[in-house]
Amino acid sequence: MSGGQPHEAGFYTCDDEFRTLILPFVEDGLTGGEAVIIGYDERKSDLLRSWLDDPSAVTFIADRELYATPARAIAGYRRLAENHVRAGAIGVRIAGDVPHAGNGGRFNGWDRYESAVNTVWDDLPMRSMCLYDATTVSATVRDVVERTHRRVHTPAGAPRTNNRYQDPAEFTGVPAEPDPLETTPLHIELHDPTPAQARHAMARSGQGFVTDTILGELGIGLSEAVSNAIIHGRPPVTVRIWIHPGRVLIHIHDSGNGPTDHLAGLIPTTRTKSGGLGLWVTHQLDLDINLIHSSGGFTVRLRGGRLP
Amino acid sequence: MVVVDCAPSTGVSLCAEEPSVTGTKFVHDHVCGVYDHADGFVARAAAFLAEGLDMGNQVCYIRAHDTDESADVLGILRDAGFTEALDSGAARVDSLGTSYPTASGQGPAAQVQVYAAATQAALRQGYTGLRVAAEVTDLVSTPSRLDAFARYEILIDRYIAHGPFSAMCGYDRRRLDDHAISQLACLHPIGGDDAAPFRWHAGRRADVRLSGEPDSACRELFVRVLDRTTIELGKQQLIIDATGLKFVDHRAMGALEDFAAARRVHVLMYTRLRTAARIRELLDLKYVAVEVAQ
């Protein structure tokens, strides 16, 4: 089994139970000289502030961009933790809200995040607590939570060791949800394009349907995916683009096996500036991304604009 | 639905480039004249030089070493209306050996001085400047020659950007492969459009002008261009006008960072691409700053 930093979960059904689970985690950390970073929404942050003797001792992150994408959350928490460690903290505790339908968000990609955070901060003295509202969490999300946390807390008693936990290298994520646009006629299909050809076709097709900002970010994602398919994949490379007012959906497919690294795109693959970062850069952008492995090859699905 | 097979063998291209121009109306006249027919280049060169004559320049056609194709250059120019200019000395025809005496090894900077001196001589004779069209394929016919000449192209382009000197460089596509031509085309502000995925050359109000789309397909080319770029001693900041940049990826931004770090210079890039600023932020670059122009 790989990884080591404590990454635990809990389920609550009301504010009192939420308090029972979060308060000891925060107070034990503060007492022990650790930094505590909280990424909750305004309501839960205000609740927590009201329960603490000294809320100023906790770092509350109000910027919702922290949870804009899974890769951004991993990088964001890393930066915050590194700053605290440099400032003298002997450890860092984090707690925040992973987006899912029950809290008004979308869970796509966050299954990989929950698995990844068992290992991605191994080099830092971090521990995390993921608390979910049992009254709103879906069966799919609960299943992921149970497979990605070694221990699960309940308000009633001691945390239990979770025998459903899957090592990140073995974790199987949630299949990508079909998008209704995929059942509509394609706008354009490209066979073996260069990255530039793909970008130009997408930009011409998407002009006026989504903002220039979204087109720009889609251009980066598309270019990286085509580049990776050419360099690392197996031909033929096919790009399919669907266009709809307010939306662009793109499949980049090759007949290879795709990345074998379960952390692909969630962390930078190298610390150098000159290459190997394409998938990670793409995962930092305001795009919805799925990495889809199938018997026929590997597909990167990019979605820009509003989601269904 | 439109289906496009982009494989090279079909000849389909979605990347319609601006057509090549033979003459120019730009001040920074440094033209890449890629050609695949000898007479075609001389005709384009004649148009370029005629424009120079109209501006009061002294003009010069520099022909390749004596070959059957170059033998009738004088005839072609006279037919193009250059007789009076040739007779008065406003126009002349020289050879590579005469005009590029440093080609055998004195270094790119020395060749720039040759043209600087020739330009000053033209000015002293009452001309407004010097304009040259040179068939230089022989000077780039091996990898080492091409490397040296590419470094020269970067330096002479700086001189052209700010001085009364302009040039068209002729490259024979029949003797040079696409890889060689792209290394040269991208160093010119104009010409060779289908061979230059991006352009890197001197700017008039910035140190460098970067345009086009440096991406994964031309990463090696971009790195090579940066390697060949020298920075003046003591220079601490390099201003890049990237308002003509249409795409940039993390590889190119990373290469710029490596380039700047190696030369201990800080780069300030002006661009309209918000994605350039975003990538810079994501990569946490230390030597490259980006300002997004509105």
Image (cartoon, coloured by chain):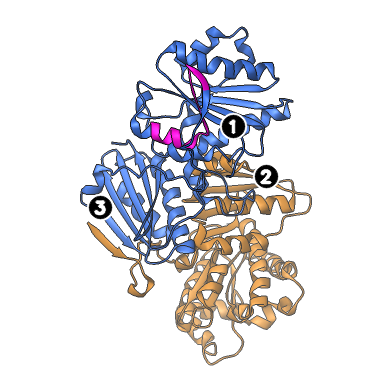
Chain colours: A blue, B orange
Give the amino acid at mark 1.
Answer: Pro
Could you tell me which secondary element the residue under label 1 belongs to?
loop
Name the residue carrying label 2. Answer: B287
* Label 1: chain letter: A
Give yes or no for residue A228 being in the magenta stretch: no
Dot 2 crowding, Cα within 10 Å, few <14, some 14–19, many 20+: some
**Vertical order, A305 against A241 (above or below):** above
Residue B187 in sight in this render:
no
Q: CA distance from mark 2 to mark 1?
A: 37 Å
Residue A16 in sight in this render:
yes
Could you tell me which secondary element the residue under label 2 belongs to?
loop
Q: Quadrant of residue B28?
A: bottom right
Please indicate whether residue A142 sits to the left or right of residue B129 in the image: left
Front-most of residues B65 and B142: B142
Q: Position of residue A36 (x, y in %)?
A: 61, 21
* Label 3: chain letter: A
Query: In percent of the image, x 46 and y 36: which residue is there?
Result: A69
Q: Which stretch appears magenta? A: A142-158
Frontmost of labels 3 and 2 is: 3
Please indicate whether residue B169 sits to the left or right of residue A187 in the image: right
Please indicate whether residue A186 sits to the left or right of residue A67 in the image: left
Front-most of residues A143 and B11: A143
Q: Quadrant of the C terminus of chain A?
A: top left
Q: CA distance from mark 1 to mark 3?
A: 47 Å
**Vertical order, A136 against B56 (above or below):** above
Name the residue carrying label 3. Answer: A187
Give the amino acid at mark 2.
Answer: Tyr
Q: Quadrant of residue A110?
A: top left
Frontmost of labels 2 and 1 is: 1
Q: Position of residue A77 (x, y in %)?
A: 58, 31
Query: In percent of the image, x 52 and y 52: which residue is there?
Result: A261
* Label 2: chain letter: B
